[in-house]
């Protein structure tokens, strides 16, 4: 999932364009944009197995949430750079969903 903060323009990553990762600084209540212009708000974060994960929900151009558009992304730190990648493992999604729900 290529994400970037929508409020602050970040420099382009040196990673290939077709990667599913991008430099980003995520924190709760931040709106982020995909390279395809889809927008998400960061709702919550958690640590699991020494990895930081974020719960994100889609928002429209007017910043209204789209409750059917939810994802969990993993923070990846590589050589001092921070990236995120969408969690796709169904078992991990179930575990993280339970953790994140318990924190709300």
Image (cartoon, rainbow, N blue to C red):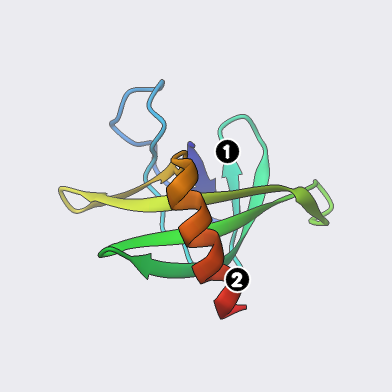
Q: Position of residue 96 (x, y in %)?
A: 48, 60
| Circles 1 and 2: CB atoms closer than 8 Å | no
Instruction: Tell how many labels.
Output: 2
Give the residue displayed 50% in from the left and 70% down from the top: 99
The one nearer the camera, 56 or 83, is 56
Give the residue displayed 30% in from the left and 30% down from the top: 15
Name the residue at the left extreme.
79
The one nearer the camera, 80 or 84, is 84
Pointer 1 residue:
34
Secondary structure of residue under mark 1:
strand
With 63 as the anchor, is 50 left or right in this view? left
- Give me the disc on residue 26: none
With 20 as the anchor, is 97 left or right in this view? right
Quarter where residue 29 is shown: bottom right
The one nearer the camera, 50 or 43, is 50
Q: CA distance from mark 1 to mark 2?
A: 24 Å
> How crowded is the residue under tag 2: few (<14 C-alpha within 10 Å), some, or many (20+)?
few
The one nearer the camera, 96 or 30, is 96
Give the residue displayed 59% in from the left and 63% down from the top: 30
With 49 as the anchor, is 24 left or right in this view? right
Q: Position of residue 32 (x, y in %)?
A: 58, 51
Secondary structure of residue under mark 2:
helix
Quarter where residue 19 is shown: top left
Note whether residue 39 is visible.
Answer: yes
> How crowded is the residue under tag 1: few (<14 C-alpha within 10 Å), some, or many (20+)?
some
Q: Position of residue 79 (x, y in %)?
A: 15, 48
Assign the C terminus to one quadrant of the image: bottom right
Q: Position of residue 95 (x, y in %)?
A: 47, 59
Pointer 2 residue:
101
Give the residue displayed 66% in from the left and 35% down from the top: 37
With 58 as the anchor, is 99 left or right in this view? left
């Amino acid at each position: 999932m290529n994400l970037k903060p929508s409020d602050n323009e970040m420099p382009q990553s040196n990673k290939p364009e077709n990667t599913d990762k991008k430099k980003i600084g995520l924190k709760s209540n931040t709106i982020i944009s995909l390279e395809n212009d889809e927008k998400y708000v960061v709702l919550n974060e958690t640590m699991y197995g020494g990895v930081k994960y974020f719960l994100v929900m889609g928002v429209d151009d007017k910043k209204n949430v789209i409750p059917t558009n939810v994802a969990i992304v993993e923070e990846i730190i590589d050589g001092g750079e921070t990236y995120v990648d969408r969690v796709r493992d169904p078992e991990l999604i179930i575990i993280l969903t339970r953790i994140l729900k318990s924190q709300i």
